[in-house]
Image (cartoon, rainbow, N blue to C red):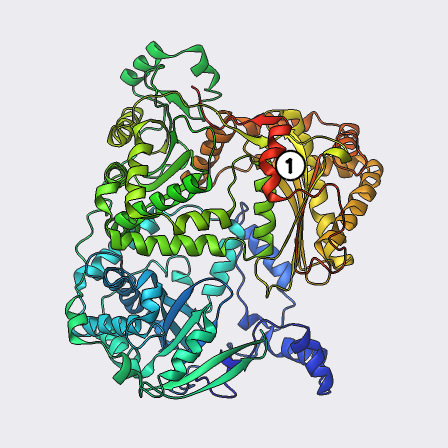
Amino acid sequence: MSGPIPEGHPARKFGWGNKKSLKDDPAKAGIAVRQYLVEHYKEHYRADRMNLVLISGESVDVMESWVRSQFAGVPGSRGSRTRFDELPLCRGGCNFGVVPSSRAQHKVSVSFHLPSWLEKHYGKKAEDYISHLVGHEGKGSLLALLKEREWATDLCAGIAEQTSAFWMFDITVTLTEQGLAAGPGCGLAAVQAVFGYLDMLRASPPRKWIWDEMKAISKIKWDYIDEEDPSDYVSQISGDLHVVPVEHALNWSFLHESFDADLVLQLLNEYMRPEHAQIHLQTNEYDAQSAAAKALIDAGVVTRASVAHEEWFDFDFLECHMDIPSVCGGDADTTRAFHLPKKNPYIAENFSLLSGRGPTAAAAATTAATATAAEEILRPSQHCPRRIGPADAFHPTYHLLDDKFRLPKVATFFRFTRSGVRSSSPREVAMTHLVIKLLEEVLCEEAYLADTAGLHYSIYMDGCSSIDFRIEGFNDKIDQLISLVFDSFSRLETLFKDDAFQRVKESVVRHYQNALMKPTKHASFLRLQTLKHHHEDPRDVKAEVEGIAADDVRRFVSSVRAKGRLTTLITGNCGEEAALVIAKNAADRIGCAAWDVAPVESVLDMQPGPEGWILRREPVFNPQEGNSCIEYYLQIGPAADVQRRALLDLVDQILYEPTYNTLRTKQQLGYIVSSGTRLTQGMLGLCITIQSKAHSATSMEGRIDEFLASFAGVLRDMPDDEFQKNVNALIEHKRIKAMTISDQGERFWDALIHRDAAFDHREADVAAIEATSKSDLVAFFEHDVAPGGAGVRKLVVCVEKDQGGEGGEGGDSRLLDRHALAAYFAEHKAYLDESVLHV
């Protein structure tokens, strides 16, 4: 949507480009696009409009010699880049729009154009001060009031776009059905609350203590910043150099040089008033909300409305003219409900580092006294976690004191595994998801303060048998956040209210309603549903969620906590004794009784040969979807088999680029083409995915078969030196170290949960890869991957935009309906899931 942006403004240009804009339309107009591109290149691609950033282990002198040799010929002397500071900001015009959404959602956005000269004041962070408060989630915040009135579930605020013509400040509210209908309708009641909060900020002089908190947090984050991916880092810096001087290119986004209350008020008073706003409602109920917006004409809310068409993405939307100040101006009662946040108690103060040389003498003695042979097996090296505490402890705890990153940070992982759960059901999945979302709801206001201070948590589930907690950040105050999370979990049934339950329930229903909207997501789900005995269908889960009441969840969460096991991993700047205390406190807060935790038969062991191959086919979930998708999956075997892991990784290494080049670039089967390995709860697989607008998913199976069959010859004929290059590249990749404590912890957690605590599996992989010959790889490929191989176990998933089109439904004997999955599992051998620990 162009909104009020005038004709000729650079922001009206279609910035992405497609065949129509770059070829078809120019050809009709007699425009030589290539000539325009050449002229543009000559005019703008010059040294004084370019930035170059290098990261290397070489010396500065060596890098300078590289730059001079490679870039000396770049022309210069055209002056600095073109700017658009003098263009007027876009205001007025069609200031309210209704836009269709293919996803089940209602979002209302309030946007303001701010002046681009703000980039010169990056050290004042005036716009960050406003976004910090508008986006706050604590008591007295905008979101807190919207939730209290049952109007919204989420809110985000901040600079969404920066150009040399303007900056765009967006406030986006995710609405409930009640919030969509409240007040004048069309989400405008929530917009009125937005302006009420801005009125409160205007009436409250900007507080230096809030800015000082932001400064302190930013300084801590900068002082102890994690290493970034080098390619992403240099790309970011090169772009930033267009905005900030060299001396601040690295830290300008963290830099707080001076508090300027007048600048904050200038933004609020001159640029962020209702008369300067653009409001957009994006909804999957477009027809109903368009009619509701047009009906507001009779009420005097909207002066006129007209349907417009978005040319490039081909959809209709409604443009409206509205006197926003009179309709949506903040009312006094709403404004009085807001107040500024409390001081943040989670800001770290102690940054001392532990030795990182192993446990203390006392802890070491305790460990030695309780160590068992099994524990020694689980201690592959001093750089891997090991189990600590009593050997017979029901709740296992693993720990590694960091001696690599030397940062005052910790990453903690907890898995609560329910006892006695051998099978799931859509209802139990629905209940577990509601428990997690309700826990996030009761944590929201307090945990937001921790999040702004660099302490983060996430909660997610694995089926309905396990709930995982990941809590990480600066170690100084992390125990407070861990205590908050597990204390809230232990009393959840008493903490959430019925009205909050209805709001959370609505968001969970929408989650499952949207789960299969993208064909690639739909195909991945069908694959997992076929392979995992208990991977419930989102359509069934949605139906269950709709029938669940608040008291049902209260009874469920109380029973869930009664019996189970808590597995803990703590890595980073935390000693062994402190780790044991954290783990014990978390388990004690849950209060679960020790109980046998049984493994679950969850992953299908497919049968080789055509009689064992499986086909899943479903129409696209969204009837307006124009793409089909295929997931072509080959099951390889248990991940515990290190030799097969090495062979599969080598196939993936060699196959990745030719898959894209052949199926996308040469054959042009689809826009999305990829290949890669899969690990499904202990079972390895190889997967090729194609999303296509031009071909049916069914027809693409044959194209993939042909490609893999021909690639067997490519492998056989591959020169030995090329094979060795791929081996070396894969080994180098395996040896890439984790870049952060968080990344390292995630690797260890994956090994603990999914690889039977094989923390050194990468070292084992390298040894197996080094021992693999080309003949080994060819034999593996021909037996387990290439069509016709005796060991091929194939699952093909087709998500079709039109099942009656190319390829057709047919009578394929492999076709397995989702309702027949349970019977199919009962007839076939299943692979035992080892993800539930028994140590």
Judge whether 56 appears above or below 100 on screen. above
At horizontal 46% and vertical 52% (from top left) the residue drawn is 512
Query: With 122 as the anchor, is 598 left or right in this view?
Result: right
Q: Looking at this view, is 317 or 688 the one in front?
A: 317
Q: Looking at this view, is 95 or 814 the one in front?
A: 814
Give SS at disc 1: strand
Do we see residue 433 in this rendering?
Answer: yes
Q: Looking at this view, is 684 or 375 the one in front?
A: 684
Query: With 633 as the anchor, is 442 left or right in this view?
Result: left
Q: How many marks?
A: 1
Task: Residue 116 in the image: state x and y as whole percent.
Answer: 39, 76
The image quarter in which residue 722 lies: top right
At horizontal 66% and vertical 57% (from top left) the residue drawn is 628
Q: Residues within 10 Å of mark 1 (few under 14, many from 20)?
A: many
Judge whether 791 appears above or below 30 on screen. above
Task: Residue 784 in the image: state x and y as whole percent.
Answer: 74, 32
The image quarter in which residue 289 lies: bottom left
Judge whether 65 appears above or below 824 on screen. below
Task: Residue 275 in the image: state x and y as whole percent.
Answer: 30, 84
Image quadrant holding the C terminus, namely top left
Q: Which residue is mark 1?
A: 685
At horizontal 42% and vertical 26% (from top left) the residue drawn is 385
Query: Callout 1, which amino acid?
Result: Gly
Query: With 628 as the anchor, is 327 left or right in this view?
Result: left
At horizontal 37% and vertical 56% (from top left) the residue drawn is 506
Judge whether 497 appears above or below 432 on screen. below
Task: Residue 76 in the image: state x and y as whole percent.
Answer: 59, 74
Do we see residue 349 in this rendering?
Answer: no
